[in-house]
Image: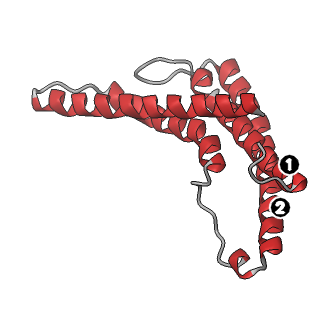
Amino acid sequence: MDLIRKVSAAAHTLAGIILGVMFLSMVANIIARKLGVSMIWVEELSGYGAVWATYLGIAFALREERHVRVDILTRKLPPRGQELMRFLGDLVCVVFSALITWKGFYLIWSSYISGRHTPFLEIPIYLLQIVLPVGMILFGLEALMDAVRYLNGKENAL
């Protein structure tokens, strides 16, 4: 369990670095445009960077309870009912992440076979898509750890 937390924290750190690189490249592009030069690849880099930052940060957001949670109905339940709904939500997240991971690997394989590349940076698309199953595996593992905590009755045990 500690390994999952460390990998999730490393992914979160990498997401922050990616956001920093995106910011700096956008600022550089703004300055370059003022000087009459355009770095068209920055927009491509920023688009893929946003996707990477999202998928790398999703597991950390779940662990830190910083993701969006619709609780308009569940907060009207007694505490035990709220815990049960959270447990069921965690199970849905595990199933969802498994499905997206499976489809993500299929997408990567299809992109690899097709030999597609990005327009400006000419990076193979499958390399950029690797973040999809990686992020969803981490997300699913965090949700699974939450579910295990519920079953053990130890909210802060892991």
**Residue 148 circle label:** 1
Image coordinates for residue 99, horizontal then vertical, percent: 80, 43
* Placement of the C terminus among the 4 image quadrants: top right
- List the single residue furthest toward the left: 35
Whether residue 39 is visible here, answered yes or no, is: yes
| Residue found 41% across the figure and 35% down from its top | 19
Nearer to me, 77 or 101: 77
Q: Secondary structure at mark 2?
A: helix
Q: CA distance from mark 1 to mark 2?
A: 12 Å
Q: Secondary structure at mark 1?
A: helix
**Amino acid of disc 1:** Val
- List the single residue furthest toward the bottom: 76
| Residue found 27% across the figure and 25% down from its top | 39
66 shown above or below 8: below
- List the single residue furthest toward the right: 151
Instruction: Write down the residue under mark 2.
Output: 88
| Residue found 50% across the figure and 33% down from its top | 15
Which image quarter: residue 42? top left
